[in-house]
Each structure stands twice: as C-alpha cells, then as structure tokens.
Image (cartoon, grey):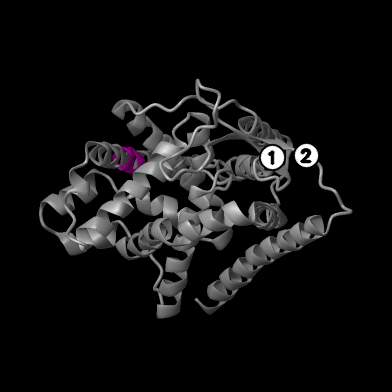
C-alpha cells in the first residue's frame, strides 16, 4: 500500500482521530473501528498493522530502524497510537465523568454517531445482491445478539487476561463490534479498563512525587502485571487480526463491507440511549464496587423514551449532534482527498 504524504494539518487531525478511537474503544457499545471506517483510514490502519511481520522484525533486529519505521508505516501508526494512549488518560477520563453525570446525553450522542456511520457506509455501497444482503443480515443478527448476552464473573488468571487482550482489540479492527462491551460480557471490563489503568495512572503520579511505598504494594503490582499481560494480548490480537482482515478485505471486500454494516446496525441496541443500569451484586446482596468506589454495571434494561419530557428532546438534540460529527468527518475526508 502506497503511504500518502502528510501535511502538518493531516498529522494533527490523525492524532485527533487517535483520541477519538481511544475514547470510543473505552465506552461499552461503541467501536473505535467505526471511527476509523468513517474517518476514511480503516484500510490503511489494517494494512499498516499487517506490515508488523517477520520481515519487519528482521529489519528491527538488524538495526535498520529507519527502514523498519518506513516499512510498517510508522509515522501513521505512531500518531494514531499516541492519540489513543493520550485519550486513555485524558479524553476517556472526561468521558467517564460525563457518563456519570449526563449518561443519557452521552449515549444519545454516540447513538447519533452510529446512525451517521450507517448512512456514511451505506450511501456509497452499490454492490447489493442476494449474497451481500445475506451477509448484512448475518452481521445485524450477530451485533444485536451480543447486546443480550449475560455477563460472566471477573477472572484475573493471566492466561485468560491475555485472551481478553486479544478479544478487546476487536473494537478497533471490526467496526460495530465493541471490544469494551465484550469485556463486560466476559466479566473483566472493570478489572482491565478501570482498575488496572487507574493503577498505572496512580503509579506515574507516585513516581513524579518520588513516592515509592505505594508502588511496592502487592495489589498495585498485581494490577500492573495484569495490565502488562492484557497489553501484550492486545498487541498480539491487533497484529494477528489485521493479517486476517487484510486478506479478507483484499479478496472479499463487498461481503466484508456488508457484514460490517450489519454489525454496526446491530450495535444500535447496545448504545440505545434510554436504558437503566443493571448492577452486579455480591454474595452479601450488596452492589459490587470497583476500586474507585463506583457501582459495577452488569448490563442494561432498555425502555421507550417519554416524549412529554424535555430531557427526551434534549437527548434528540444530542443524537442530531452525533450525526453532525460523523457528517463533519465525512466532509473533512472528502476535502482532504480532493486536495491530495
């Protein structure tokens, strides 16, 4: 794949897209892959990770760092991954706050973004036939059925944590399939995306203050080791899934697009704004809390909105706002392609 020349503006917006992917990946029900698909860099994202192969490792081992960086499209990946990492410690923290304070409006905005994504993908897809319609229906069924599965219990076994890492990157590589929601279903969302990430954040804060006592805490070290194994699994999953998807996109692009569109349509049930939290309960009958004292959500009970409520109409406004974000990204993508 030919690597495009990037202006300073392109680099800045690529970093911003990384922020958006990172924030989306952390929200249950939202897929970072949708951001990549709509923003127009999904295929470059997949093909770049496909380049992390035996040839790339040979270049790295032989000390040919510049050739390695060029071969794997390093400028693109480094800007995107930098945005995603920064997002986990900034944007996603802000997003967590708004989910706690104005949950309905956050879900409404994401619902609008997914509606806009469906429009974006479907409007230029002119390859509908019996086969692609069937694949789209399969995608819808799979995406919808995921939202109604019952969550499992938390499991901190390192082998299982590694498997969770492999599974979690599905949200980046498969638009419409939320990796964070999958982590909720297999019981490890709080452990891997809340407790362990907070442990790393707190460790950095302690190191800045030269506080080494907290770092020696067995619980802190346990969470950091879990995060390390989870990150390793995510890298392995991202590279391996990218190789599979690269082959699929190259040989079955229309059917792949149809099933991705179906996945995204099916995921609307996961991000439906009007829902009530169903909490996890312990053996003592009390609601379970995570390390920050927040109640642990197991799943959601959906309901139809009350149109007599001003809050419902405000949520409708946020749905329109979400659609506008996607259309704005589409407009910017078209403008960039015309100027290229």
- Asked whether disc 2 touches disc 1, contact meaning CB atoms under 8 Å apart, the reply is yes
Residue 46 x %, y %: 43, 50
Q: Is residue 332 above or below residue 98?
A: below
**Is residue 244 something that shows in the picture?**
no
Residue 309 x %, y %: 84, 55
In magenta segment, residue 154: no
The quadrant of the picture occupied by the N terminus is bottom left
- Specify the farthest residue to the right: 308
Please give the residue where the numbered disc 1 appears in the rendered image: 276
Q: Residue at x 65, y 29 (%)?
A: 148
**Is residue 30 something that shows in the picture?**
yes
Residue 98 x %, y %: 58, 58
Which region of the structure is painted magenta?
A: 229-235
Q: Which mark is residue 303?
A: 2
Q: Residue at x 51, y 35 (%)?
A: 184
> In which quarter of the view is residue 317 placed?
bottom right
- Specify the farthest residue to the top: 283
Q: Residue at x 49, y 49 (%)?
A: 25
Q: Secondary structure at mark 1?
A: strand
Name the one closer to the observer, 99 or 248: 99
Question: In whole angstroms, how far apart are the C-alphas of marks 2 and 1?
Answer: 8 Å
Name the one closer to the observer, 191 or 22: 191
339 sits left or right of 14 in the view: right
Q: Secondary structure at mark 2?
A: loop
> In which quarter of the view is residue 260 placed?
top right
Q: Is residue 233 above or below residue 203?
A: above
- Number of labels in the image equals 2
Q: Residues within 10 Å of mark 2 (few under 14, many from 20)?
A: few
Q: Residues within 10 Å of mark 1 (few under 14, many from 20)?
A: few
Name the one closer to the observer, 123 or 143: 143
């Amino acid at each position: 794949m030919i690597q495009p020349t990037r202006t300073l503006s392109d680099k800045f917006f690529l970093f911003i897209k990384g922020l958006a992917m990172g924030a989306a990946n952390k929200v249950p029900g939202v897929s970072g892959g949708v951001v990549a698909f709509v923003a127009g860099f999904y295929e470059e994202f997949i093909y770049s990770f496909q380049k992390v192969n035996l040839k790339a490792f040979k270049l790295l081992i032989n000390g040919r760092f510049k050739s390695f960086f060029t071969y794997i499209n390093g400028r693109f990946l480094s800007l995107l991954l930098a945005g995603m990492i920064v997002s986990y410690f900034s944007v996603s923290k802000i997003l967590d706050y708004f989910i706690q304070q104005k949950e309905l409006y956050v879900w409404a905005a994401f619902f609008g973004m997914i509606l806009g994504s469906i429009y974006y993908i479907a409007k230029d897809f002119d390859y509908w036939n019996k086969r692609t319609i069937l694949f789209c229906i399969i995608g819808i069924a799979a995406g919808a059925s995921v939202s109604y599965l019952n969550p499992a219990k938390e499991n901190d076994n390192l082998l299982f944590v590694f498997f969770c890492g492999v599974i979690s990157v599905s949200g980046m590589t498969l638009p419409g399939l939320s990796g964070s929601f999958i982590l909720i279903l297999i019981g490890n969302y709080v452990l891997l995306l809340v407790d362990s990430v907070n442990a790393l954040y707190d460790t950095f804060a302690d190191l800045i203050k030269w506080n080494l006592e907290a770092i020696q805490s067995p619980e802190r070290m346990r969470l950091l080791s879990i995060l390390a194994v989870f990150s390793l699994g995510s890298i392995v999953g991202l590279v391996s899934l990218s190789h599979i998807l690269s082959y699929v996109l190259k040989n079955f692009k229309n059917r792949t697009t149809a099933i991705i569109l179906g996945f995204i349509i099916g995921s609307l049930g996961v991000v439906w704004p009007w829902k009530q939290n169903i909490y996890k309960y312990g053996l003592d009958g009390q609601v379970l809390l995570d390390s920050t004292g927040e109640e642990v959500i197991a799943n959601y009970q959906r309901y139809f909105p009350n149109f007599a409520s001003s809050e419902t109409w405000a949520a409708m406004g946020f749905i329109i706002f979400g659609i506008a974000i996607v259309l704005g990204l589409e407009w910017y993508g078209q403008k960039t392609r015309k100027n290229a």
